[in-house]
Image (cartoon, helix red, strand yellow):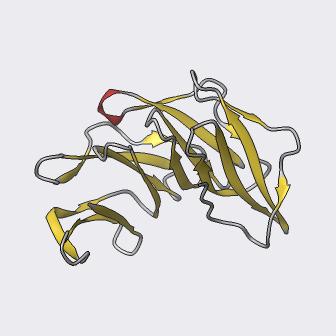
Amino acid sequence: MIVVVNQGDETVGAFRLDARTGGLLPATAATQPTDANPYAIAADPNGRWFWVTHGDASDVVIFRRDLVSNVIERAAAAPVATGEYAVGASIDPSGRFLYVMTMVADAVAAFAIGDGGTLTPVEGSPFAAGGRPSGGAVDPRGRHFYATIANNGSATISAYRIDARSGALSELPGSPYAAGKGPFGIAVF
């Protein structure tokens, strides 16, 4: 399944993959409304829950996917406040923690993921990011988190250690690291 955030009509769209051709087919109930100015999406490793960030609303909305029918729907839980202007989202490989980049708040909001995709702020969250974080990624082993920072000409990557029990972030010695002009997205592999 592929899920996409549509800023133009403030929806989340879903597609099934044609296993034979690789093409996309509309999923059942393929479009669901979301809040104003959706930016990013992060899905749990099992594909049952996903979270959409919203810049204008400064929140995250929880969505659920039925694993049998592939129908997606907005969860009954209320949107979760993130800090001002939520633009990026990343989930750790275990599916236990969600990290949201809040561009205007200059921070990374961290959440523990509970039953039903619910989000509970991690103790100490939000974590300072040095200014205007946009993209974020967790390494494949779930030990480190990296955020792109583009603040008034400063172009860096902030690096953090993830506390395996709590999901809390602590900045690594030597961080931030210089990056190219205007870094926004990031991937770790």
Give the residue drawn at x 59%, y 55%.
189
**Viewed as shown, does residue 47 lie left or right of 155?**
left
Q: Position of residue 79 (x, y in %)?
A: 40, 42
**Viewed as shown, does residue 13 lie left or right of 188?**
left
**Residue sitting nearer the eye, 23 or 100:** 23
Write down the quadrant of residue 16 in the picture.
Answer: bottom left
Residue that extends furthest to the front in the rendered view of this protein: 20
Q: Position of residue 24 (x, y in %)?
A: 23, 74
Q: Position of residue 91 (x, y in %)?
A: 49, 44
Give the residue drawn at x 84%, y 54%.
177
- Up the image or down, 159 lies above or below 152; here it is above
Write down the quadrant of residue 45 in the picture.
Answer: top left
Residue that extends furthest to the right in the rendered view of this protein: 174
**Viewed as shown, does residue 116 lie left or right of 35?**
left
Give the residue drawn at x 60%, y 46%.
139
Number of marks drawn: 0
**Viewed as shown, does residue 27 lie left or right of 182?**
left
Write down the quadrant of residue 70 in the picture.
Answer: bottom left
Give the residue drawn at x 66%, y 40%.
144
Q: Quadrant of the N terminus?
A: bottom left
**Residue sitting nearer the eye, 83 or 139:** 139
Q: Position of residue 13 (x, y in %)?
A: 28, 66
